Image (cartoon, rainbow, N blue to C red):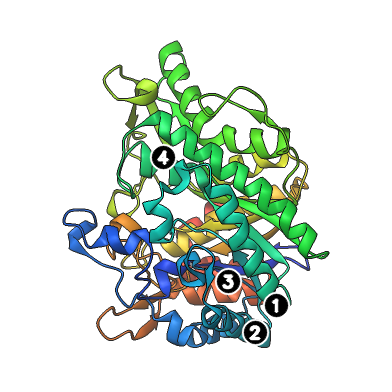
């Protein structure tokens, strides 16, 4: 039988990704908590509640990460905990984050610290949130407090998580707070977020000489249903421009693209030391004049395998496509999120192996990927989908908070410890992949 081992680079970092509101619990001072109290906002009426109880006991899950051989953990700081009112800093919250970061370092795990992951202080939302140009100075003040307080524990900073998703779901689709459907406002919000990123990038470098600063960018491919149809190609290009290209054009090339703006993005160029990739799926787009902005209708590949909960098409090769696109920037890449919702863990082992195989192939092409962060460690509160999408390597009983490792956790741990995909792992967790990954 054919035998081959897919080795990863010696210093490659294996990790998991998390977000404060999804795991900490009782984040009662942000706009998401307020959103959850409104009927019909969250699937099945779910609420974040205690979440994964990280505010009290994150260290127990850090132990899981350490036991799996992981060397990186992406977590976010909750702005509403740190700045409870404009200019009013809660030093006890910063003390708790110090404890978390120290606990990670004690376990040999390098923290990647995200400064904004979808949740805003309620006081900021009441001032118009990211549609208010004053948000840039508000965010800079908050970032300054966090970096000054936590800089001795972290040097890898992610300013924003998925500003394209935040603007799209909150201001076009209306399924995230504030629940608006206004593309002009969405464009304004995205513009302010990218300006805030650039300001934070420069501020962090002034505060910390060793800082490495990036942004987590979600890439979702929009492929035309009929590649020979000019209309399908047109709407696919429009959606790709808005969702995928606008962010990097502004903060790397220093250019505003429509609808966010036109012409040079002054002071924005090359405000990245690295780029983070969040990748999950793709859409097929067909022209439909009644479908809203961009006049695109989402379809699925005939007979495509779908992920649980209607999350999208199972499309692992998209990871390599996304990495090739980001490689054009010529800077290091971190995979800041990748995973699938899978209640019974029947897809996740295969998804892990296939995505990591495509990552390995990208590395063979000298694409400078430095780390991989699986979304996520423990089942958590998945925003508008509540608790209906279990992404965790570890299953959690919401009522009892008890954890139980899924088979995919054991697979990921074996890959991380060995820094490789072996035939034995393929045969043990997804033998049906042998003809693809180990061809004769």
Please report the residue visible at 48 percent of the width from the left and 40 percent of the height from the top.
Answer: 189
Specify whether residue 281 is in view.
Answer: no
Viewer-closest of 315 and 158: 158
Disc 1 from disc 2: Cα separation: 7 Å
Label 2 or label 4, whichever comes before in sequence order: 2
Query: Which element is circle 4 on?
Result: helix
Of circles 3 and 4, the one toward us is 4
Label 3 or label 4, whichever comes before in sequence order: 4
Disc 3 from disc 4: Cα separation: 42 Å
Please report the residue visible at 70 percent of the width from the left and 71 percent of the height from the top.
Answer: 148
Specify whether residue 363 is in view.
Answer: yes
Q: Give the residue at mark 3.
A: 424
Q: Give the residue at mark 2.
A: 102
Give the crowd class for mark 3: few <14, some 14-19, many >=20 residues within 10 Å.
few
Q: Give the residue at mark 1.
A: 153
Across and down, in percent, residue 246 comes to 58, 33
CB-based contact (under 8 Å), mark 1 and mark 4: no
Disc 1 from disc 4: Cα separation: 33 Å
């Amino acid at each position: 039988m054919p035998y081959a081992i897919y080795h990863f680079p010696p210093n490659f970092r294996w990790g998991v990704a998390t977000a404060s509101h999804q795991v900490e619990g009782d984040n009662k001072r942000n706009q998401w908590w307020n959103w959850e109290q409104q009927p019909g906002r969250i699937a099945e009426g779910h609420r974040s509640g205690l979440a994964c109880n990280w505010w009290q006991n994150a260290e127990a899950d850090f132990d899981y990460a350490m036991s799996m051989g992981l060397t990186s953990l992406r977590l976010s700081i909750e702005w509403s905990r740190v700045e409870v009112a404009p200019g009013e800093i809660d030093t006890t919250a910063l003390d708790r984050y110090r404890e978390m970061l120290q606990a990670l370092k004690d376990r040999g795990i390098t923290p990647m610290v995200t400064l904004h992951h979808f949740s805003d202080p309620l006081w900021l939302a009441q001032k118009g949130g990211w549609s208010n140009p004053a948000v840039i100075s508000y965010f800079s003040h908050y970032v300054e407090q966090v970096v000054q307080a936590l800089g001795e524990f972290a040097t890898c900073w992610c300013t924003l998580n998925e500003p394209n998703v935040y603007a799209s779901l909150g201001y076009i689709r209306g399924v995230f707070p504030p629940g608006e459907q206004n593309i002009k406002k969405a464009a304004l919000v995205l513009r302010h977020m990218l300006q805030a990123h650039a300001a934070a990038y420069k501020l962090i470098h002034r505060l910390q000489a060793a800082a490495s600063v990036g942004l987590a960018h979600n890439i979702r491919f929009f492929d035309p249903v009929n590649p020979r149809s000019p209309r399908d190609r047109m709407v696919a290009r429009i959606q790709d421009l808005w969702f995928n290209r606008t962010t990097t054009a502004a903060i790397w090339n220093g250019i505003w693209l429509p609808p966010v703006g036109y012409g040079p993005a002054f002071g924005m160029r090359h405000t990245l030391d690295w780029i983070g990739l969040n990748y999950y799926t793709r859409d097929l787009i067909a022209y439909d004049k009644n479908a809203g902005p961009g006049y695109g209708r989402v379809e699925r590949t005939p007979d495509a395998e779908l992920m649980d909960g209607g999350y999208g098409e199972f499309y692992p090769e998209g990871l390599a496509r996304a990495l090739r696109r980001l490689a054009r920037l010529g800077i290091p890449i971190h995979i800041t999120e990748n995973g699938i919702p899978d209640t019974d863990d029947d897809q996740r082992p295969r998804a892990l192996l296939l995505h990591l195989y495509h990552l390995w192939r990208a590395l063979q092409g000298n694409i400078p990927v430095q780390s991989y962060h699986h979304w996520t460690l423990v089942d958590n509160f998945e925003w508008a989908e509540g608790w209906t999408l279990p992404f965790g390597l570890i299953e959690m009983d919401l009522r009892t908070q008890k954890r139980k490792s899924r088979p995919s956790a054991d697979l990921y741990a074996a890959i991380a410890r060995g820094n490789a995909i072996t035939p034995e792992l393929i045969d043990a967790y997804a033998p049906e992949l042998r003809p693809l990954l180990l061809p004769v």
